Image (cartoon, rainbow, N blue to C red):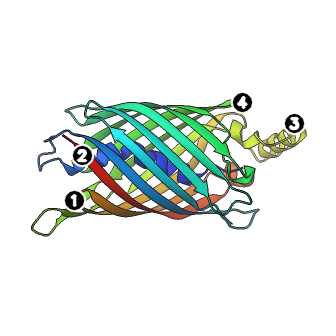
Amino acid sequence: MTRKISAIVVSMLIGLSPVFSQSSIRGQNDTLTEEVSYFLFNLMYNTNNSVGQIDQTTNISTTLGDVSFYHKSGAWVSLMPAVYSNASEFSYDVDASAGYQYFFQNGFDVNIYYQYHFYDGDSAFMGIDYQHSLNASAGYTFRRFYLYSDFYSLHGTEVNYFANTGLGYYYNWSIGKTGKWSLSIFPMLSMGMGTDFWLYQQLTSTEKATLISDIGQEGYKTETFDFQSMDVIIPISLSYSNFSVGVSYLYSNTANKYKFAGIENQSGFLFSIDYTFNLK
């Protein structure tokens, strides 16, 4: 059992993509100069490695696609399928999301959305078993800094709650005289917290009781909401007009309690190519 950092990070980047777009059309005084509706078509490949103290390095590389529509009113929808190429059988999941994001004039933004999740295939690649997710986040832009916090629940046979808070720095360089080329970077440091019920999802009653006892003997609390990881995300994107290619470095350092339970640190690169189709 492991939380897939690829799914966490991709969901975060999809949620923050309006922040990228809004930032790219801000003037020097950080005031919004234009609002447009647009489609975003994205193809991604993630080289995600899980490095554990118990298991050997596990490669859970993923090919992902995303088709999203963002309306200038703030409403948005997204459909994101993913295929796990190294699974022992054909394995995939599909996330369908719908939400609303609003940008205030003072730099604050809020985002709420619902997501339906479906997975089929190798149980080793499933991650947390859930079908529905409710999400709420808030952010604040100050000059080039972006402070954000989110809270979400995953609903399946049981409910798990998670929260992330972090700080990012967005910078965009214009290349050439035409203004069509640009290079952007958005490094982020995030702290993840949550309930630990997902640790025991695939265990028998005896295995669950043994693991809870072992964790308790190490001085950690169980079946509670606690610190889970520190995550570093560094997306870099090169854009020409409405096309862009990007690479993101991902690293997640798991909390000691979860390392004791066999949960791995994760690292990898996320490669992406996307096209934005603006609507008038």
Question: Mark 3: which amino acid?
Answer: Ser
Q: Which circle, 3 or 2, is nearer the viewer?
A: 2
Disc 3 element = helix
Residue designated by label 3: 205
**Alpha carbon separation for disc pair 1 and 3:** 56 Å
Asked whether the beta carbons under mark 2 and mark 1 sit within 8 Å of each other, the answer is: no
Say few, some or many: other residues with alpha carbon within 10 Å of mark 1 (under 14 / 14 to 19 / 20 or more).
Answer: few
Q: Residue at x 29, y 54 (%)?
A: 170
Quadrant for residue 33, please give it. top left
Q: Residue furthest right?
A: 206
Q: Residue at x 53, y 45 (%)?
A: 192
In the displayed structure image, the side of residue 274 where residue 269 appears, left or right: right
Q: Residue at x 9, y 68 (%)?
A: 177
Question: Mark 1: which amino acid?
Answer: Ser
Asked whether the beta carbons under mark 4 and mark 2 sit within 8 Å of each other, the answer is: no
Q: Quadrant of the C terminus?
A: top left
Residue 165 seen in the current view? yes
Residue 73 at x, y percent in the picture: 26, 30
In the displayed structure image, the side of residue 124 where residue 150 appears, left or right: left
Q: What is the number of the mark on residue 189?
A: none
Residue designated by label 2: 278
**Alpha carbon separation for disc pair 3 and 2:** 53 Å
The relative height of residue 28 versus residue 134 in the rendered view (above or below) is: below
Q: Residue at x 38, y 48 (%)?
A: 167
Disc 2 element = strand
Residue designated by label 4: 157
Q: Earlier in the sequence, mark 4 or mark 3?
A: 4
Residue designated by label 1: 241
